[in-house]
Image (tube, grey):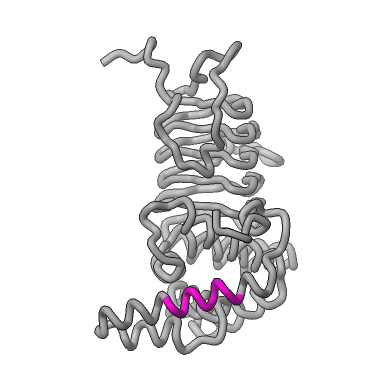
Amino acid sequence: MVSGMGCVLNGHSEPSENAEHELWMTIQQEASDSLSRETLLSTYLDAFVLSHPSLEHVLAFTLGNKLASTTLDADDLYNLFLDVLKSSTEVRKGLYADLRAFKDRDPACNTYCHCLLHFKGFQACQVYRIGHYLWNQDRKSLSCVLQSRASEVFDVDIHPAAKIGNGIIFDHASGVVIGETAVVGNNVSIMHGVTLGGTGKEGGDRHPKIRDGVLIGAGASVIGNIIVGEGAKIAPGAVVLREVPPRTAAFGAPARLVGGWKNPTKLDDVPGETMDHVSYVLDWSDYVI
């Protein structure tokens, strides 16, 4: 955890103006350092980072260019995204918490600047945050268009009505699907190929509720209006069809708990923050090659 930034990471309070400024200064310095090592990136880094006055401007410019199409103008998207980022403290809070989460928890994230410009899981999550804001402003058609473009560009499909907390990592992110009534808490880490889906064609509240600190491994599916408890771990490839208690690990298809449903093994750490995919995943007494 970055010193002095715990309030940002836990998702419960707004980052201070000083913290925001310090992070922006760090990003600019990272871009300048990259430029000094690789002059070929001069035009790129100037256009995407160094010519902008704030992190919000960089994000709006980056997303506007990524999502632009023959019928969606990059400048119009830039102005829309910047307006939302300036208007909503909740969207900004999520932005800063997510960026710090990637830097703290993803070993492949060497700099904030690298994440901001190149990590499609981070970018897709920010498009969701903007779309969710627009959805709640009754601009549903526009938010659905953003959902569709994000799915096409990033291969990440998050319904704008879903509720997602702060400090979120979509690591690699390809193939992530999150349904309309899903709820995801704070400090959750989700790998590629994960589905938080419904059980069929029924309407209403039909998607999973993922509590704080959960880690969901690559290719896992959590299906139906069920709860995955705080600090739980879903192993790669698991198919979860029933509630997972807090601080337990589920694996297999259909999923079962390490230690059994009656007396499951309890996890000591918060997997959504440690990113530990393997501890307690396999019940070795049942493992057969």
Quarter of the rendering containing residue 167: bottom right
Residue at 58% x, 38% y is 198
The spot of residue 34 in percent (x, y) is 33, 77
Is residue 15 shown above or below 174? below
Is residue 284 shown above or below 219? above
Query: Is residue 22 highlighted in magenta?
Result: yes
| Residue 119 shown left or right of residue 188 in the figure | left
Residue at 51% x, 32% y is 233
Q: Quadrant of the C terminus?
A: top left
Q: Nearer the viewer, residue 260 or 22?
A: 22
Is residue 236 shown above or below 260? below
Query: Is residue 201 highlighted in magenta?
Result: no
Quarter of the rendering containing residue 96: bottom right
Residue at 46% x, 58% y is 121
The spot of residue 7 in percent (x, y) is 68, 57
Residue at 38% x, 52% y is 107
| Image mark count | 0
Is residue 269 shown above or below 23? above
The spot of residue 77 in percent (x, y) is 55, 79
Q: Residue furthest front?
A: 3
Q: Magenta span: helix, strand or loop, mainly?
A: helix
The spot of residue 138 in percent (x, y) is 74, 66
Quarter of the rendering containing residue 66: bottom left
Q: Nearer the viewer, residue 233 or 16?
A: 16
Magenta range is 21-29
